[in-house]
Amino acid sequence: MKTPKSAVFAFLMVLPAVWNAEGAETKSGAGKRPNVLFVLCDDIRWNAMSCAGHPALKTPNIDRIAKEGVRFANMFCTTSLCSPSRASILTGLYAHTHGVVNNFTEVPENFVHWPMRLRDSGYTTAYMGKWHMGEDNDAPRPGFDHFASHRGQGKYFDTEWNVNGTGAKVVPGYYTTVVTDMALEWLRRDHGGKPWALCIGHKAPHSFYTPEEKYAHAFDQVPVPYPPSAFALEKKPGWIRERLYTWHGIFGPLFEWRKQFPDDRPAAVKDFEAMVHGYWGTILSVDDSVGLLLGFLETTGQLDNTVVVFMGDNGLLEGEHGMVDKRTGHEPSMRVPLLVRYPALAKGRVVSEQALTLDVAPSLLELCGAAGLKGIHGRSWVKLLQEGDPAWRNAWFYEYNYEKQFPYTPNVRALRTDRWKYIHYPHGDGGEDRHMAELYDLEQDPGELRNLIGEPVSAEVVPGLKARLKELMAATGVERDAMPLDEGIKKELPDQKIR
Ligand SMILES: [Ca+2]
C-alpha cells in the first residue's frame, strides 16, 4: 500500500496539533494523550457490518468508525477461540507464550497487558463486560481502576454482574444495553484530568444468539441458504465431513436453533436460516451501542481526541465448509473486523496488509505515548498507517490446540502468506499427521473451495511454506510445539455448563 506524500504531510501537521492541545478542545481535559474507547465483540464475523459489504446487515454507527477512520480489510486472530485470542489482544503474545490455550485459563499475572501499561503511565482504566479468561471468576483483574464483569459467558438477559468486587447481583435487562449504560455512566464521571481507557466486552454476537425483541424479526424476509462450500468437501480432510453432524456442523443442533438433530434434509436449512437471523439481530443492538457512545464523545467534545477501536476476538463460520462456530484455520474462522477512528492517524482508509490481534497492544501503546511491551510478537501499525512500512509482514502463522471439551476440531497449525495458505493437523505425539493437509491459493480461490494438496502445484509450493511456518514458529519462541493428543471428532455434545 502506498501512502501519498500529502497524507504523510497532513499527518505530521495534524498530530502535534492534537497532542499539544492541552485539553483546550476536550471537556475531559485529557490533553496531550488520547483517550481509548475499545469495543470488543465476541465472535463477530469480519464482514458483519455494512462497511465491509454485508448484503443484509445495516450498521450505520459501526460504519461511521470506518468512514472517518481506518478499516483493516485483512485482520486476523492467531487462535480462533475466545480466551486465547483475548489474551493475545491484551498482551501482544501468541497463545503458546501467554499460556491461555483454552477457554478455562486466567491470563497469568506476570504478563503485562496494554491497559495495565496505560494505567501505569497515568491513564484511568476501566473494563466492563465479558472478560472470559477464567471461567468461574468474576473478580476484578489487575490493571483496571474500575472492573465490572460476570462469570463465564454471561446471559443475554439479566446477567449477574460483579462491579468492583462487590459481589454478583442481577442487573435486569438486555446485556448490550446494560453494558452500554454502565459505560456511559463511567464516562460521565470526573476522571481528574487524566486520559482514560475504557474497554467494553460485549457478549454479542456470541451464541446462543438472542436478539432484542425489537430486532427479533429484522431479517425474517432474508433467505439464508447453506453456502456452496458446505457441499464441496470431497477433496477436503475427512474430519471436516465428520464435523457436519456434530455440535459444530451445519446438520447439528445449531446452538439449539434446531431441536431435532442431526438433520441433513434440505428443508432443515430453515433452522440454519433462523440461527443466522438471530446472530445478525444481536449485532443491530451493538450498532445502537456504538451510536450512543460516539454520540456521547461527540457532544462532550472528546471524539477526535479518542482512539476508538471496534473489533472482534475471533471469527465465526456461518456454514462455510459445512461448519458453524470457529477454531479452524479457514478464512471465516480466523478473520476478524478491526476499525480504528482517530483523525490524527488516518481518515477514510482501507488497509490491505495482514494485521493480527497481536498488533493491537503495541499500536495502542504507541498512539498513547506509553512505553511498549518487551519481547512481544505483535508490531505496531502506526508507521504502516502514517507512511507505509516496507518491512511489514507478508506471512504469519496460526495455532489451535485440540480441546477434549469440544472435540470437533483437530490440532491446527497453519501458515498464511499474502497469497497462500497451508494448513496441517499435527496428531500431538510428534509423529506423522493423520489428517490430510490443505493448501489454498487465496488469490485465485479466496473462498477456499479447492484444496490443492496433491496437485502438481503443491509439490512446488508446500516445501517452502512448511519451511516458512517452521521459521516463523521458531521466531516466536516455539522450541517444542506442545499440544494435546488428537482424540478425534466426536458426536457427543459439550457439557451443558460450558456451551
Ligand atoms: Ca469469542
Image (spheres, rainbow, N blue to C red):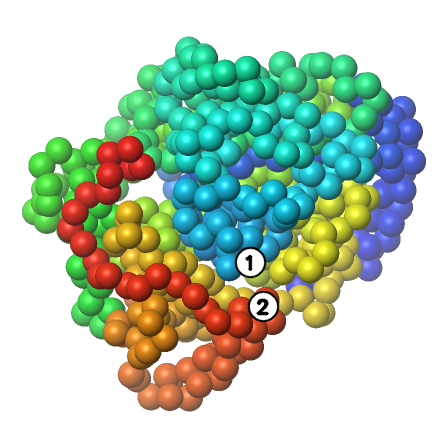
Position of 465 relative to 189 (above/below): below
Residue 141 position, x and y percent, is 59, 32
> Mark 1 sits on what residue?
97
Which residue is pictured at 35% across the width and 61% down the height? 484
Q: Nearer the viewer, residue 427 or 450?
A: 427
Answer with the quarter of the image where residue 115 lies: top right
Q: Which of disc 2 and disc 1 is earlier in sequence? A: 1
Which residue is pictured at 44% across the width and 21% down the height? 175
Q: Quadrant of the N terminus?
A: bottom right
Which residue is pictured at 64% across the width and 27% down the height? 126
> Mark 2 sits on what residue?
477
Residue 430 position, x and y percent, is 36, 75
Which residue is pictured at 42% across the width and 13% down the height? 170
Answer with the quarter of the image where residue 330 lies: bottom left
Residue 227 position, x and y percent, is 26, 52
Position of 413 relative to 400 (above/below): below
